[in-house]
Amino acid sequence: MTEIKFGKVYDLSMLTYTNMVMHPANAKIGERARLTLINSPRHVPQRPNQAIEWPVIFHIEMPSHTGTHIDSPLHVKKNGKSIDELPIEKFMGEGVVLDMRHKGPSEAITPKDLENSKPEIHEGDIVIINTGWHEKWSDTAEYLEEHPGLNEDSGYYLLEKKVKMIGTDTMCPEVGSEESHWQHPLHRLCLIENEVPLLEILGGEINEVTGKRCYIVAVPIKMTTDAAPTRVLAFL
Ligand SMILES: [Zn+2]
């Protein structure tokens, strides 16, 4: 077994909480995350000196695309692989966190941008893109619909590099627009044709590892769903 040595671990995940901001497609359906505290049943035996309210249990109900999460092929393909059917190796490995914070609203990240980015992308990398949009986290049109993103050409560029997974700090990797929330061209390209999982809604300490090559672990909860909540760690 290989021992992984690292200096520091960074958490690139968003906090998941009740009624948090959702992708407009979910929001239109009226779906929101609900994390509800269930009162402890009174018949649960209590130990001496234990507060009567304990133990507590939460009931968690939310769309599979809530907060930081990974999309699997099933999201856009009937009978496509669900999260639990993807090989676990897809969710960890070396990768780069690219700085695209100079990009403006609804501006495309082009193959040239990816080619010139530092550090350079290696075959088999997990590629994470920091647009800076995670700092605009809100229910506003600016955050939801005007984020920079990959265009189809840059999608092909990354797939030719045989990247393992693509992640962004936005609601979806495509350039933000009202239309892209339903069309999802890159979702189809990555998930249907190449089984490259998409990692969405990154945030947390992403700025601290931007412009760096690191070891990335982004493991979704093992569920038979089209997407699943994910804790994302970067090791430097
Ligand atoms: Zn998603």
Image (cartoon, rainbow, N blue to C red):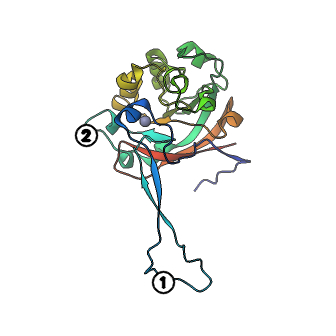
Numbered disc in front, either 2 or 1: 1
Decide if residue 195 is in sight here. Answer: no
Q: Residue at x 45, y 80 (%)?
A: 44
Residue 113, given in percent of the width and then of the height, sits at: 59, 16
In the image, residue 72 sits, relative to residue 175, either above or below, namely below
Quarter placement of the C terminus: top right
Query: Is residue 82 shown left or right of residue 55?
Result: left
Look at the numbered disc 1 and give the secondary structure of its residue: loop
Q: 28 or 205: nearer the eye?
A: 28
Residue 182, given in percent of the width and then of the height, sits at: 36, 25
Q: What residue type is labelled 2?
A: Asn
Q: Distance between the residues labelled 2 and 1?
A: 45 Å
Q: Residue at x 46, y 42 (%)?
A: 66
Look at the numbered disc 2 and give the secondary structure of its residue: loop
Residue 153, given in percent of the width and then of the height, sits at: 46, 15
Query: Is residue 62 shown left or right of residue 212?
Result: left
Decide if residue 191 is in sight here. Answer: yes
Q: Which residue is drawn at 47% across and 68% down?
A: 39
| Residue 45 tag number | 1
Binning the other alpha carbons within 10 Å of mark 2 as few (below 14), some (14 to 19) or many (20 upward) gives few
Q: How many marks?
A: 2
Residue indicated by mark 2: 79
